[in-house]
Amino acid sequence: MTDLTLRRVIKRYGDEQVVHGIDLDIREREFVVFVGPSGCGKSTLLRMIAGLEPISGGDVHIGDTRVNDVPAGKRGVAMVFQNYALYPHMTVRENMSFGLRNVNTPKTEIRQRVDEAAAILRIEPLLERRPKDMSGGQRQRVAIGRAIVRKPKVFLFDEPLSNLDAKLRVQMRIELARLHRQLKATMIYVTHDQVEAMTLADRMVVLRDGRIEQSGPPADLYESPCNLFVAGFLGSPSMNFLPATVTDHDADGVWVDLAAGGRLHVPRDGSGLSPGETVTVGLRPEHVRPADEGTLAGSLEVVEHLGDQTLLHIRLGEDSVVIARDEGRSAHTAGENIQLAFSGSTCHLFDGDGNACPILSRDAAIT
């Protein structure tokens, strides 16, 4: 069963189109995260699903019902915002029950739903407090509880953790993952934080300029990005990009000359590439290591000690810096010359248009 379907969804503000024909199926009980830079259309798309923004074109179905013209309050969705939006003069119990009282839900049922939600979120001791007497994390739990009591078909989260400090964000991520497993609910979550997206999502939808760039499980997108944008957006620190020129290709991959020096064999399908063509080699920092003898050499500019690992920023040329990851506390210091080793098998390859060259199939590698 498909719980939510978007077909050719468009959003315009006057003559400016900001969402361009989105097609997406979200399955029942799936946790889907919309991720992308500011202005990519992720919050606008979420608000159109919620009914808070009118749709300029296309269709939104929740279950079997087309909801384009259905008011927000009757769509069977509940939205949790970045701003908790709690009523300061009400207790937690009153805040959580407010929506149910407005639709004349029986008092016994209201109490039961609020108590159940409070138990799920472990906020029973807070039910008689007011928002001013609680921390940011506790307030966000109350906002989520207000959504739970409505028993919606779909939960919508619009950057709900961005007002919290770093430690509390990590804690709340764990709470949201636990909540999804416990409720077995369909959830759509918007964030610009790719760490949140990677850790929470069953499926991640990467957006840019109102279009879907790539959709799939987080590990698949990290390991097999479809283009330079997705490759650079996912990962912290970002993927290193090295300009290169194709020299040859065969059944086992592509030979390239790196602009920073060195020749490299990348086991990617180069059947569409010609000798002399400019390409980009992508390399994750965790796949680059300092070595006595390496493919590249440069000057170590910045050393970032992070405890369990050290990030090394190496300048290869005037416009090229590579980030390498060293285990533990690195002995290398800024200012020294350093060589870097890596394997072509860990590299990605992108053509002149920025599209990824696919991994060679087993059959292709044998021929």
Image (tube, helix red, strand yellow):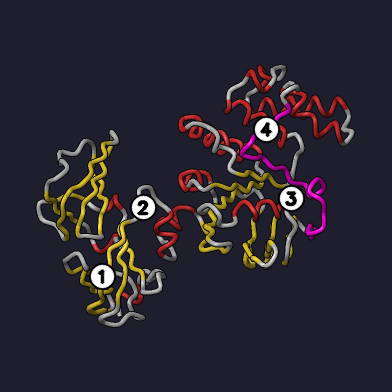
Q: Position of residue 169 (x, y in %)?
A: 50, 34
Residue found at x 28% / y 33%:
307
Which image quadrant is residue 133 in?
A: top right
Give the main secondary structure of the magenta stretch: loop
Disc 3 and disc 4: Cα gap in Å? 18 Å
- Helix, strand or loop for disc 1: strand
The outermost residue toward the bottom is 274
Q: Earlier in the sequence, mark 3 or mark 4?
A: 3
Callout 1, which amino acid? Ala
**Which residue is label 3 attached to?**
52
Marks 1,2: beta carbons within 8 A: no
Q: Quadrant of the N terminus?
A: bottom right
Residue toward you, 103 or 303: 303
- Above-or-below relation of 128 to 55: above
Disc 1 and disc 2: Cα gap in Å? 19 Å
Q: Is residue 3 visible?
A: no
Query: Which numbered dot is residue 244?
Result: 1
Q: Earlier in the sequence, mark 1 or mark 3?
A: 3
Query: Which numbered dot is residue 238?
Result: 2
Residue found at x 55% / y 47%:
191
Q: What is the magenta range?
A: 65-87
Residue toward you, 117 or 23: 23
Residue toward you, 19 or 181: 19
**Which residue is label 4 attached to?**
143
